[in-house]
Image: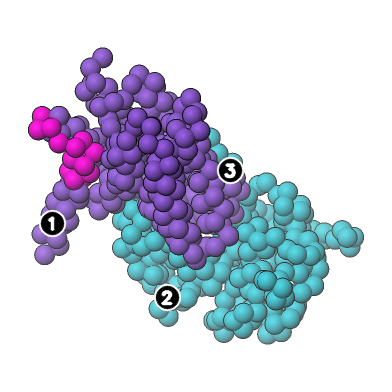
């Protein structure tokens, strides 16, 4: 398979999983979590290289999982300062990553490929990971649509109704960590959260119902990823940055149209 | 301690039993050694000044908080082990939901069914019909496709009441349901609540500051008092104990309703 085909497949998969989770995260006021987990994940990758682990990517995934559990705890313990603890963790993650990368000069990988992504270097194993994670996210959203809706709209009501809120929260957090760690190679740690949150923002702007906003977020992300990757390939631009800028352009266009309508 | 609870008729079963319940926030006691029982088809009003622990007590009852001491029982079972959660309708204090949340009225009302019982199950046509009936009964069926954040406070309150009623609960718990709603809407709201109490097999526990509005309905003297909390109770069976199918009579109710203020 051509590197560009692999890039397109990876992009299409992650453009479904990222915005799906992202919509729930944005509505639960956890927009920042994408940045935090991705930065901690890069620190995990760096640690993986330093320790000579077989799969630095798996180390990155483990770090993201640990971070997501920490965030979930902090969110419960300090309801009002949850954002602050998330911000601190984000800074800590990236600081640790840069420190670890500076410790060893012989990585043979460069930190920028983790910060900005390297979608053209996706290999078959990467694609399988991405496909598995995407399948799990899609299955979860389809099978637990009702429960996720209620958890997001009114977590107290979910608890009163007898839903296992703790398990559901944990499950959503774990999925978030998985999605982020597999997305890093595609758009890069610095831009992962854009792929989660901007399509959600677009969906929220245009949708009349919750169901519509889910579908719109995914549809817009797919369009932006396909168009962005093709444009980036054609003009030799940075793929992650092109996709994210396209998403922002879509959001701005929506805002302009909305304003026109309301005038 | 389950002695002395011999029901004299089928409809006097205890619905909420609070035995020696205590709760403290960071060592500051809010509720101390509270005893109270709400029986089937009671209308119980919980009153008291701000900070007396009204909302805290409701949260203890619905399981959002765990008591530090004592026991809460629901429908005769320890609350912690009570599994038929769909029998409880809960309308929390003025919902602090995100006004930009992209949910329609229909989506919110349906979510009243998304409890434990529906876990891993699909919504059926019957579920959608229940939502239709609940919206119809509260006069919000025309708003079904509107985003919840675009409604007025009174309309939103109706949506949340409809959400609580959609599962035909046996116990309805309301936390200051009329805060921030204009007087006229409040009147129709209380009218509706009273109607439901009189004609449906439902038990009510409501926190409210406006006891005057219900003074014709409730006794002047509190049935029980604990700390600064006061319980006013009206037990209602004008006719008999026979259970009424809620959704069915909710449907009838709206057809029979003549007062326009009640509907919109």
| Chain for disc number 1 | A
Question: Where is mark 1, residue-wise?
Answer: A256
Residue A128 is situated, as x and y percent measured from the top left of the image, at 39, 22
Q: Is residue B200 left or right of residue A131?
A: right
Q: Are marks 2 and 3 on the same chain?
A: no
**Vertical side of A133 occupied by B115: above or below:** below
Task: Indicate which disc residue B181 carries.
Answer: 2
| The N terminus of chain A sits in image quarter | top left
Q: Nearer the viewer, mark 1 or mark 2?
A: 1
Question: Where is mark 3, residue-wise?
Answer: A167
Q: B40 or A213: which is nearer to us?
A: A213
Corner quadrant of residue B60 = bottom right
Of the chain colours in the picture, the one used for chain B is cyan
Q: CA distance from mark 1 to mark 2?
A: 35 Å
Q: Main secondary structure of the magenta part?
A: helix
Q: Residue at x 45, y 53 (%)?
A: A92
Q: Secondary structure at mark 1?
A: helix
């Amino acid at each position: 398979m051509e590197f560009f085909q692999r890039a397109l497949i990876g992009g299409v998969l992650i453009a479904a999983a990222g915005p799906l989770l992202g919509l729930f995260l944005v509505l639960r006021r956890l927009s920042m979590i994408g940045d935090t987990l991705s930065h901690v994940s890069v620190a995990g990758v760096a640690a993986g290289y330093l320790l000579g682990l077989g799969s630095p990517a798996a180390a990155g995934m483990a770090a993201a999982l640990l971070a997501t559990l920490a965030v979930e705890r902090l969110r419960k313990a300090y309801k009002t300062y949850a954002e602050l603890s998330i911000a601190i963790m984000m800074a800590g993650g990236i600081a640790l990553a840069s420190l670890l990368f500076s410790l060893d000069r012989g990585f043979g990988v460069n930190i920028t490929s983790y910060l900005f992504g390297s979608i053209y270097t996706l290999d078959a194993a990467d694609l399988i990971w991405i496909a598995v994670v995407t399948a799990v996210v899609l299955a979860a959203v389809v099978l637990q649509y009702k429960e996720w809706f209620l958890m997001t709209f009114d977590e107290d009501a979910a608890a009163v109704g007898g839903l296992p809120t703790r398990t559901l929260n944990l499950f959503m957090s774990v999925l978030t960590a998985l999605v982020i760690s597999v997305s890093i190679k595609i758009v890069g740690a610095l831009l992962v959260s854009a792929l989660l949150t901007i399509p959600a923002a677009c969906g929220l702007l245009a949708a009349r119902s919750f169901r519509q906003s889910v579908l719109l977020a995914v549809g817009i992300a797919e369009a932006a990823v396909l168009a962005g990757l093709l444009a980036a390939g054609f003009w030799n631009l940075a793929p992650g940055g092109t996709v994210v800028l396209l998403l922002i352009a879509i959001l701005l266009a929506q805002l302009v149209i909305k304003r026109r309508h309301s005038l | 301690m389950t002695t002395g609870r011999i029901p004299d008729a089928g409809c006097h079963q205890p619905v909420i039993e609070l035995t020696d319940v205590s709760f403290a926030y960071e060592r500051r006691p809010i509720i101390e050694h509270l005893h109270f029982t709400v029986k089937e088809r009671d209308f119980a009003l919980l009153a008291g000044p701000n900070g007396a622990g009204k909302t805290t007590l409701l949260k203890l009852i619905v399981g959002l908080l765990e008591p530090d001491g004592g026991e809460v029982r629901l429908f005769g079972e320890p609350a912690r082990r009570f599994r038929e959660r769909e029998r409880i309708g809960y309308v929390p204090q003025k919902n602090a939901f995100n006004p930009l949340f992209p949910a329609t009225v229909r989506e919110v009302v349906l979510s009243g069914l998304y409890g434990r019982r529906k876990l891993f199950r699909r919504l059926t046509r019957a579920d959608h019909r229940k939502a239709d009936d609940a919206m119809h009964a509260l006069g919000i069926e025309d708003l079904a496709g509107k985003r919840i954040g675009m409604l007025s406070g009174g309309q939103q309150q109706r949506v949340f009441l409809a959400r609580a009623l959609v599962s035909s609960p046996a116990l309805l718990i309301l936390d200051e349901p009329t805060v921030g709603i204009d007087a006229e809407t409040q009147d129709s709201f209380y009218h509706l609540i009273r109607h439901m109490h009189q004609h449906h097999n439902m038990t009510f526990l409501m926190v409210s500051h406006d006891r005057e509005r219900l003074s014709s309905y409730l006794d002047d003297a509190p049935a029980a008092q604990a700390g600064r909390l006061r319980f006013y109770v009206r037990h209602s069976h004008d006719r008999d104990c026979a259970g009424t199918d809620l959704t069915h009579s909710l449907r009838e109710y709206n057809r029979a309703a003549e007062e326009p203020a009640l509907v919109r």
